[in-house]
């Protein structure tokens, strides 16, 4: 059973398969992610990119295979347990609490008072405030702490959701299309942000914008029909004829 | 800090609203109304417990329960069982074939007090039962549903079905529950006549204080991180789940708390009205409670109390003169509120209240010795 072997990787996915009514969205996938690595997954629509993230964070249950995070098997944990183990995930469309302020969005994501009674007794003390300020600065929203989140620009919403993950200090950060709908300037700022926050943790990004991918990726994996088509450094992957054929060359 | 709060209660505004309500039910009603009318208001205010519980559960939690009558009923029946046992002392029931058991049991050829009735000989155990039984019942329902991620309209339907089942059960088990007539002919509480005017007045005030306490406790929940989590869950449940929270536990807790509040209302109902029957358990009362909360404003704890009072005053006034029209009127009112004023009375006050307060603004000036008038002008501007 190679499923139980321990590895030095932050994330080790082995033989992962999920099938929906016989259709294999992810097909015996093997994938490894190192600490301090910023890894981008690209691929055409329907390649199974988002499904892989869903599988890691527990939103979708795998049919077979193993997902190990810091040598802890994730496939049998529930969503909140996976988060508490140190996996944070940003959704494709900004998923924030529109009716609450930026500060409240961050406060809710703060990793204390996660139980029913803990949340009733939760105190918004100096430690919490400092942490919120620190994260707000990182995501360039320190001036908008009291703004209702629904009023932020699309790009700022994306940053806020990233901040909501950062405040939990996850060891693995997964971002699904973090620059979708952003202006050129916002993309640059986001690239900078991602380069900064990948220190000390692993970051897994799904993205379509190749220019952006080139700016941030340490490694790139190309998914196609639930399988890995190519993997490696961006410049090598871009030259790969298979990749050009199914994804880049149109 | 908190947007929704600033809008609805705010720190100072919330306090003022609370004080106005307290003054109204503790001073104005008792002074202005005769004993009969005051008892009627007391009865209405017991429904307000259920309406407040729906503000928490439905307004903030986003989970509509069409079965708050279940818990109102459990609380009411628990109290009624105690009072009935006291009224059925062997001396009082000497003419029955089995003295010492409630009369309806005797009529149904039951010769021994059923086991589940025995704890209700004790007033302490009864009070505990009023709080604990509905909470446990809600926990079972809540755990069964929320852990399986059943929510929304399915939850509403299932709670409604449970309330029907409970009604059928109560009506069917006449020997154990008093059947369709309910538990009637309640006289004393620890030897003290509960039908006297003085007792009814006292119950009225106890009821008011309990209601105000429930509102404060609810507000404590809503202003804590828990309250913001409720709103967050209503908005983006997945985001909360993927922020490391076990969403089901939060829903179960608020459902249990809502059940307990409703049960307190039910128990106070029995004390003030003097009987309990299945007609306060089923679909109609459960839906009426939702209407009270909707009309008062489902995001406002205090609004729910006003909504309850308004609808019940209307019900009494109209059903005295046009009994057959009342249900249509209430249905129409509900539709109008949902379509045009989704935040109910509290929402109307939010939108138009400042016109009224502006007109009375000169009153503020008498009290406002402040040096910071300029500040408040600025604030007013920035708010709009």
Image (spheres, coloured by chain):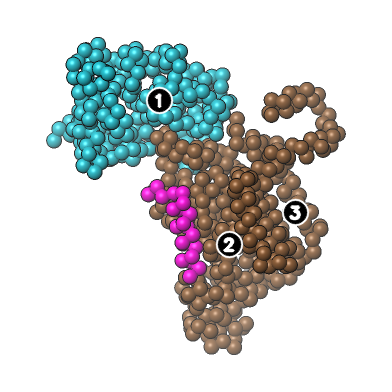
Chain colours: A cyan, B brown
Question: Distance between the Cα atoms at labels 2 and 3?
Answer: 26 Å
Disc number for residue B58: none
Residue beneath disc 1: A169
The quadrant of the picture occupied by the C terminus of chain A is: top left
Residue beneath disc 3: B26
Task: Write the residue at 66% across / 74% down.
Answer: B187
Chain of the residue displaying label 3: B
Tell me where residue A2 appears, x and y as whole percent: 15, 32
Dot 1 falls on a residue whose secondary structure is loop
Is residue B235 in view from this perspective?
yes
- B123 or B245, which lies in front? B245
Q: In which quarter of the image is residue B318?
A: bottom right
Tell me where residue A120 appears, x and y as whole percent: 52, 40
Neighbour class for label 1 at 10 Å: few (<14), some, many (≥20)? some
Chain of the residue displaying label 2: B
Dot 3 falls on a residue whose secondary structure is helix
Q: What stretch is highlighted in magenta?
A: B147-168
Residues beneath discs 1 and 2 located on the same chain: no
Disc number for residue B285: 2
Task: Write the residue at 69% across / 25% down.
Answer: B382
Neighbour class for label 2 at 10 Å: few (<14), some, many (≥20)? many
**Between marks 1 and 2 in the image, the one whose residue lies nearer the viewer:** 2
Chain of the residue displaying label 1: A
């Amino acid at each position: 059973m190679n499923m139980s072997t321990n590895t030095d990787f932050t994330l080790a996915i082995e033989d992962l398969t999920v099938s929906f009514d016989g259709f294999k969205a992810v097909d015996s996938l093997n994938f490894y992610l190192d600490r301090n690595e910023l890894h981008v997954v690209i691929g055409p629509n329907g390649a199974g990119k988002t499904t892989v993230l869903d599988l890691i964070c527990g939103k979708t249950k795998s049919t077979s295979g193993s997902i190990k995070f810091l040598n802890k098997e994730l496939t049998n944990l529930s969503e909140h347990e996976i988060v508490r183990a140190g996996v944070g995930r940003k959704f494709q469309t900004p998923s924030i609490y529109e009716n609450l302020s930026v500060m409240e969005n961050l406060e809710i994501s703060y990793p204390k008072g996660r139980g029913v009674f803990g949340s009733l007794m939760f105190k918004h003390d100096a430690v919490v405030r400092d942490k919120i300020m620190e994260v707000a600065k990182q995501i360039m929203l320190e001036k908008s702490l009291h703004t209702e989140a629904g009023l932020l620009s699309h790009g700022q919403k994306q940053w806020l959701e990233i901040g909501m993950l950062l405040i939990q200090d996850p060891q693995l950060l997964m971002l699904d299309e973090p620059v979708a709908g952003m202006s050129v300037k916002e993309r640059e700022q986001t690239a900078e942000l991602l380069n900064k926050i990948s220190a000390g943790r692993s970051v897994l990004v799904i993205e379509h914008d190749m220019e952006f991918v080139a700016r941030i990726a340490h490694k790139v994996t190309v998914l196609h029909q639930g399988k890995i088509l190519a993997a490696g450094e961006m410049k090598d992957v871009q030259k790969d004829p298979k990749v050009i054929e199914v994804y880049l060359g149109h | 800090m908190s947007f929704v709060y600033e809008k609805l209660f705010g720190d100072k505004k919330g306090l003022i609203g609370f004080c106005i309500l307290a003054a109204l039910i503790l001073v104005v009603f008792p002074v202005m109304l005769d004993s009969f009318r005051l008892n009627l208001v007391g009865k209405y205010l017991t429904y307000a417990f259920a309406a407040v519980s729906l503000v928490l559960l439905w307004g903030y939690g986003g989970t509509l329960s069409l079965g708050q009558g279940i818990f109102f009923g459990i609380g009411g029946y628990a109290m009624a069982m105690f009072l009935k046992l006291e009224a059925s002392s062997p001396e009082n029931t000497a003419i029955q074939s089995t003295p010492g058991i409630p009369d309806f049991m005797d009529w149904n050829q039951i010769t021994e007090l059923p086991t589940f009735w025995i704890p209700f000989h004790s007033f302490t155990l009864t009070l505990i039962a009023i709080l604990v039984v509905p909470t446990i019942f809600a926990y079972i329902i809540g755990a069964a549903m929320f852990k399986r991620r059943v929510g929304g309209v399915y939850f509403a339907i299932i709670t409604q079905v449970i309330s029907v089942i409970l009604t059928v059960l109560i009506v069917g088990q006449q020997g154990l529950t008093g059947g369709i007539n309910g538990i009637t002919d309640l006289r004393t509480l620890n030897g003290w006549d509960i039908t006297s005017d003085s007792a009814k007045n006292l119950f009225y005030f106890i009821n008011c204080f309990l209601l105000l306490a429930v509102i404060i406790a609810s507000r404590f929940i809503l202003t804590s991180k828990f309250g913001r989590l409720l709103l967050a869950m209503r908005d983006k449940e997945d985001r909360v789940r993927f922020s490391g929270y076990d969403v089901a536990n939060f829903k179960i807790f608020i459902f249990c708390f809502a059940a307990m509040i409703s049960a307190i209302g039910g128990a106070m109902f029995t004390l003030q009205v003097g009987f309990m029957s299945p007609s306060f358990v089923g679909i109609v009362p459960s839906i009426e409670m939702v209407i009270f909360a909707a009309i008062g404003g489902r995001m406002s704890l205090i609004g729910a109390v006003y909504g309850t009072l308004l609808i019940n005053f209307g019900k009494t006034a109209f059903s005295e003169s046009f009994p057959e029209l009342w249900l249509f009127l209430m249905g129409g009112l509900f539709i109008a509120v949902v379509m045009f004023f989704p935040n109910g009375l509290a929402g109307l006050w939010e939108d138009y209240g400042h016109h009224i307060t502006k007109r009375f603004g000169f009153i503020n000036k008498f009290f406002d010795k402040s040096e910071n008038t300029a500040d408040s002008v600025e604030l007013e501007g920035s708010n709009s």
